[in-house]
Image: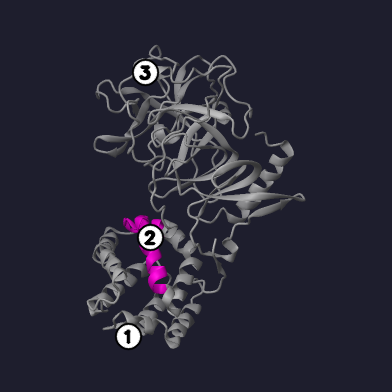
Amino acid sequence: MIIERDVQRRLALGRRKMREAFWSQHNVVSIGVGARQRREEWTDEPAITVGVVKKRKPGYLRSDQILPTQMDIDGVTHRVDVVETGEITFAGKQEYVPPGWTLSSRYRPLQPGIKIANRTNRAGDNDFYSGTLGGFVTDKEGKKYILSNHHVLMNMGTDIPVLNQDVIQPDTDADTAIIGRNYSYIELRRGVSASNVVDAALCSIDDQSAIDESFPGNRMIPINSSHRAIGLYFASNSSHQRGWICRINPILNRFGVSLGPEATHEVDGYNMFDPIEKVGARTGYSSTQIVDVDAEVKVTMSNGKVYNFENIIGTERMGWGGDSGAIVCLGGDGNTLVPLKHVEEEGCAMFTAVGRMYDLPLQGDTALGDRIRDEFLSQTRLGGLLTHLFYLNAETVMNRARQSATSAYEKASARSLYDKYRNFVESALNNPRDPAFVMTQENLSDIAQAINGAALHMTTDESNALGDIYRAALEPTLGMRYDELLAHMNNDAVYQQVLDRLIRVPTIATQGVIRGN
């Protein structure tokens, strides 16, 4: 599918407008130029594509957070296609090994597609955050280097990258594992206004004669003038349904290197749905298609740090964590896809952010949160207000959680309360009228402890308001059973008292239209 130049120009303009309006929202993780999907099937209708962490059913958004379904650009209407992707990450856990296929053993000579890692970038005592040897590039003096991702060759756990660190083939004998040292990198910048174009670094090669530019098992033909490289695979979503590729030209130009004496790399010579292929250390060979020709994406590290990328190519089912750094070429049948990882509930973005803050597994509790909302809170006026406030202030809470430092004591206290009440809450929802479920002084004391802990990350006005609400609305529930608690939360005086107190806090949003999405 060829997107005409004028159409692509309009869609790019629409993408920029969408970015200005919605990029600051945590839930929006990609905006691109692609095609519309209907019932999970691709159409030939060009569209502005938006990836979101979660499309809730029903979802709740402030009116200023609702994404448009179409945009008028220079007098022409184009669709906006919203797709749930979950978070986009650099790497994932090594939970899948393709049957009969591994590129983790010792390879000499070195070949593109094999498993490599920075020796200092450890995932555990005997494990590394590994990636793929993408290919070999040559400088003006004829010296060859390994090309892969920055997050593969550098230690992403350090704020300032360190050069001359050993690069190894993991899972091999320690004495023979070293293949070179990280040599040069393109800086990855973080920040709201910072943006990156590529994720790339170079590694020196100890033995310049121990190089074979063919792929293991001849799974893919070598890069040449008729088999052009377009970029490096560097990120995917959690199910691996979607993947992202940084373009090869900016990488080669920045390092001043080439892939070989022939014209072996792209010059914007590809279109929507063109077939592409790669060989990665995790999933071996795969071939899929281009589904986004010009995207901006947010990529999240496991520690919650977020990097913005622009001018990125989007694809489907191309790789998993461990395939990062693989060179992607035009070619293949477009339908040799990697397996999907089944992802249960992707999770509430706020649960994820707060869970990271306190080291709690809250992302897996989205379904429980939905039950609390639908089976308990929705039955009362005060519960409806609390639900409303949850969504109105979600972005503020997530930003606070990402920016807050929590002590070991805070995390231990939060874990103690989580372990004590997680299953208790689920049991209460399953049988709310069990006479054993009654509000006790111990329950109220634990709620007070949680409020005091949260107050460490609040303004004075916010913490004072929560204290007042605790005394006015929570303390009177001592001894109440389920039906009594519902009646209390439906009391107009209690509802108004809570609302009036919150309205006086300037940092808490209490007004806004919530709509399903």
Amino acid carrying label 3: it is: Asp
Magenta-drawn stretch contains 376: yes
Disc 1, disc 3: CB below 8 Å?
no
Q: Residues within 10 Å of mark 3 (few under 14, many from 20)?
A: few
Rendering coords of residue 160 (x, y %) = 41, 40
Amino acid carrying label 1: it is: Pro
* Secondary structure, magenta segment, majority class: helix
Q: Which residue is mark 1?
A: 476
Looking at the image, the residue that sits furthest to the top is 209
Looking at the image, the residue that sits furthest to the bottom is 493
The answer to whether one can see residue 404 in this image is no
Query: How many circles with numbers are drawn on the protein?
Result: 3
Q: Residue at the spot x=47%, y=36% of the render?
A: 317
Disc 3, disc 2: CB below 8 Å?
no
Q: Which mark is residue 367?
A: 2
Q: Which residue is mark 3?
A: 206
Q: Which badge, 1 or 3, is on the more N-terminal residue?
A: 3
Q: Which badge, 2 or 1, is on the more N-terminal residue?
A: 2
